[in-house]
């Protein structure tokens, strides 16, 4: 019984991972449709001040 308590969650995790890979193969996304990762830096064109403007002092 203890072995089942260990093996069943591991098997379920494996099934979820395999299904995720299968979905990626079955339904590929274009790079333009994918959202940017949360840690991605902002684009260079999104600055609030024009180029050459000195930074404001705190």
Image (cartoon, rainbow, N blue to C red):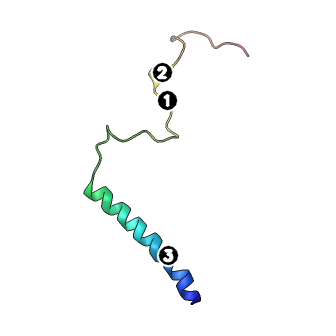
Q: Which residue is mark 3?
A: 10
Q: Give the residue furthest to the right.
A: 58
Q: CA distance from mark 3 to mark 1?
A: 38 Å
Tell whether 39 sits left or right of 56.
Answer: left
Q: Residue at x 49, y 79 (%)?
A: 8
Q: Nearer the viewer, mark 3 or mark 1?
A: 3
| Disc number for residue 6 | none
Is 54 drawn above or below residue 5 in the view shown? above
Q: Which residue is mark 2?
A: 46
Counting the numbered discs, the total is: 3
Name the image quarter holding the N terminus.
bottom right
- Between discs 3 and 1, the one toward the N terminus: 3
Which picture quadrant has residue 2? bottom right
* Mark 3 residue crowding within 10 angstroms, few (<14) / some (14–19) / many (20+): few
Q: Residue furthest left?
A: 26
Spatial CA span between label 1 and label 2: 7 Å
Q: Position of residue 26 (x, y in %)?
A: 26, 58
| Left or right: where 54 falls relative to 57 | left
Say which residue label 1 marks: 42
Callout 3 secondary element? helix
Residue 18 lies, in percent from the top left, at 37, 67
Relative to the observer, which residue lies in front, 29 or 47?
29
Q: What x and y, as percent, mark residue 37?
A: 46, 42
**Other-residue count near label 1 (Cα within 10 Å), few / some / many at <14 / 14–19 / ≥20:** few
Going from N to C along the chain, the mark reached first, 3 or 2, is 3
Residue 24 drawn above or below residue 18: above
30 and 45: which is toward the camera = 30
Asked whether the residues under the numbered discs 1 and 2 touch, taking CB atoms below 8 Å apart as contact, a structural biologist would say yes
Where disc 2 sits, the SS reads: helix
Is disc 3 in contact with disc 1, using a CB cutoff of under 8 Å? no
Most extreme residue toward the front, as rendered?
1
Label 3, label 2: how far apart the Cα atoms are: 45 Å
């Amino acid at each position: 019984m203890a072995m089942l308590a260990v093996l069943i969650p591991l098997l379920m995790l494996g099934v979820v991972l395999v299904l995720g890979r299968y979905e990626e193969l079955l339904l590929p996304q274009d790079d333009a449709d994918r959202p940017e990762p949360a840690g991605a830096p902002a684009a260079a064109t999104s600055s609030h001040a024009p180029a050459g403007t000195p930074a404001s002092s705190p």
